[in-house]
Image (cartoon, helix red, strand yellow):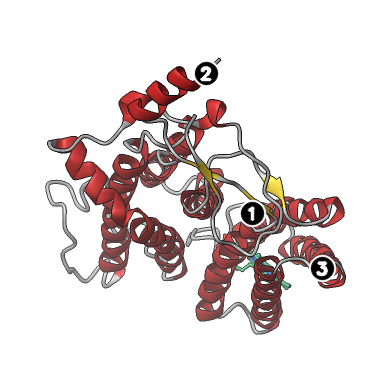
Amino acid sequence: MGPVSTKPTDAAPTTPATPSAVAAPAAAAAPARGPGALLARARRWTHPVLVANLVAQIGIIVTGGAVRLTGSGLGCSTWPECEPGQFTAAFHSETSYHQYVEFGNRTLTGVLGVIAVVVAVLVWSDRSRTRPYRLLGLAPLAGVVAQAVLGGVVVRMHLNPGLVSLHFVISGVLVATSLLLLHRSGEGDGPPVPVVTPRLRALGTTLSVLTVPVVVLGVIVTGAGPHSGDDEIAYRIAVDPALMTKFHAASVWLFLAVLVATLVVAVRTAAPGTVRRSLWLLLGITLLQGAIGYVQYFTGLPWVLVGLHMLGAALLVAGAVRVPLTMRTRAVVEPVTAHDSARDRATSP
Ligand code: HEM
C-alpha cells in the first residue's frame, strides 16, 4: 500500500485516505529518460503556470471589457483574420484605434491559449493524480476554444445579444475553474475532510452559489444599458436597466449578509486562519466592488469605473470559490510503486 502523508496546512483533523481508491498504478512511476522524464521535470512549473492561467483568465475579462467599452467590437471585420487576407490590425481612418483594441484582445486570447495548452499537458500527463483532477486540467483549454468559437460567431452574427452576454458568463466559469484547479494542485487526492463546523461549511457553499445570481443579474444590467456593445440601438437586452440594477444590487446585499454571517460564525468557532483570511479578503473585495457599483450607477456609468467593476467581478468570483475550498483538507496519497506492490504481496497474509 502506498504511504499517505498530509500537507502542512493549519487545517485540523485528517483521516487516513483510502489509497486503493486514489493511488496511481505501478506503471505510472516516472520514467528515468525520454519525453516522460522531460514532462516529469517540467511539472515542477505546474504551480506558476496555474497562477499565470488564473491571472490571464481574469486579465482577458478586462481586455474583453475594453473592447466593448471603447466600442471596438467590430474593429476587426472578420475572424480569425482581422481584415480579409490580413491577420494583424492596420490603421485606417474609419476604424481608428478600434482595430488595435480588438486585435490586442485577440492576441491575449492567443497567450491564454498557449498557457491553457501547457496547463493541459502538465496536468493531464501527471499520472500520479486522480482522473477527475487531470480532467480538470483540460477545462481552461476547452473554455478558451469555446470562447474563441463564440467570439467568431459574435463577429459573424454582428453582436447577437444573447451571445455577447454569454461571453462574460463563460469567462466567470473559467475563472472559477482555474481557481479550483490551482487549489486542487496544492492538495492531495484523499477524500475531503472538513476542518470547520457543518454550519460554516453550509454557509461557505451558499456564498459560492449566491455569486451566480449576482453575476448573471450584473450581465443583464450591462446588456440593458449603454455599455452593451451595440452602437446602433444602445442596448442588447430589452429590459428596464434601472429595475434590473435594483435586482442586481438586492442580490449583492443578500450575498453580503451571508458573507457577514459566515465571518461571524468563523470567528466564533475559531475556524482555521486560512478560512478566516479568505473571508476577510472576500469581504474587502465585495465592499470595494459594491462601492464601485453604486458610484458608477450614480455618475452615469463612466467606462473606467465599468471596466474596474468587471475586474472586481472576476476577483469576487475567484474569492467566493476559494472560501469553501479552505474549509476542508485532502491528504496527499503517494503513487503505488512496483516496490510497494511487491512488498505488500510479500507481507499480506
Ligand atoms: C459586489 C458585488 C458585485 C458584483 C460581483 C457585480 C458584478 C457585475 C457584473 C458581472 C456586471 C456585468 C459586467 C459586464 O457584463 O460587463 C455588473 C454590471 C453592473 N453592476 Fe454590478 N456587481 C456588484 C455590485 C454592484 C452594486 C452594489 C451595484 C449598485 C447599483 C452595481 C451596479 C452595476 C451596474 C450599474 C452595472 C452595469 C454597468 C454597465 O453599464 O456595464 N453592481 N456587475
Identity of the amino acid at label 2? Ser
Give the mark toward the camera: 2 or 3.
Answer: 2
User: Ligand 1 near label 3 (Cβ, under 8 Å)?
Assistant: yes
Relative to 75, 215 lies left or right: right
Most distant residue in the top direction: 349
Q: Answer above or below: position of 318 versus 24.
A: below
Tag 2 residue: 348
Which residue is disc 1 drawn over?
325
Residue 245 visible at all: yes
Q: Position of residue 308 (x, y in %)?
A: 53, 76
Spatial separation of the CA atoms under disc 2 and disc 3 = 59 Å
Above or below: residue 282 compared with residue 329:
below
| Corner quadrant of residue 274 | bottom right
Q: Residue at image x 35%, y 28%?
A: 339
Question: Is label 3 in a helix, a strand or a loop?
Answer: helix
Residue drawn at the location 31% of the way across and 36% of the way down: 125
Please say whether residue 77 is visible from this viewpoint: no
Instruction: Name which of mark 2 and mark 3 comes first in the sequence.
Output: 3
How far from the left and from the top, in percent, is residue 222? 61, 62
Q: Residue at x 16, y 58 (%)?
A: 88
The local crowd at label 2, few if under 14, some if 14 to 19, many if 20 or more residues have their Cα within 10 Å, is few
- Residue 81 against residue 249 in the figure, above or below: above
Q: Dot 3 corresponds to which residue?
A: 253
**Ligand 1 is found in which quarter of the picture?**
bottom right
Label 1 to label 3: alpha-carbon separation: 23 Å
Q: Secondary structure at mark 1?
A: helix
Of 284 and 38, the residue lying toward us? 38
In contact (CB < 8 Å): disc 1 and disc 3: no
Q: Evaluate if marks 2 and 3 touch, with contact meaning CB atoms under 8 Å apart.
A: no
Q: Of the numbered discs in the image, which one, if any, rests on residue 272?
A: none
How many dots with numbers? 3
The amino acid at mark 3 is: Trp
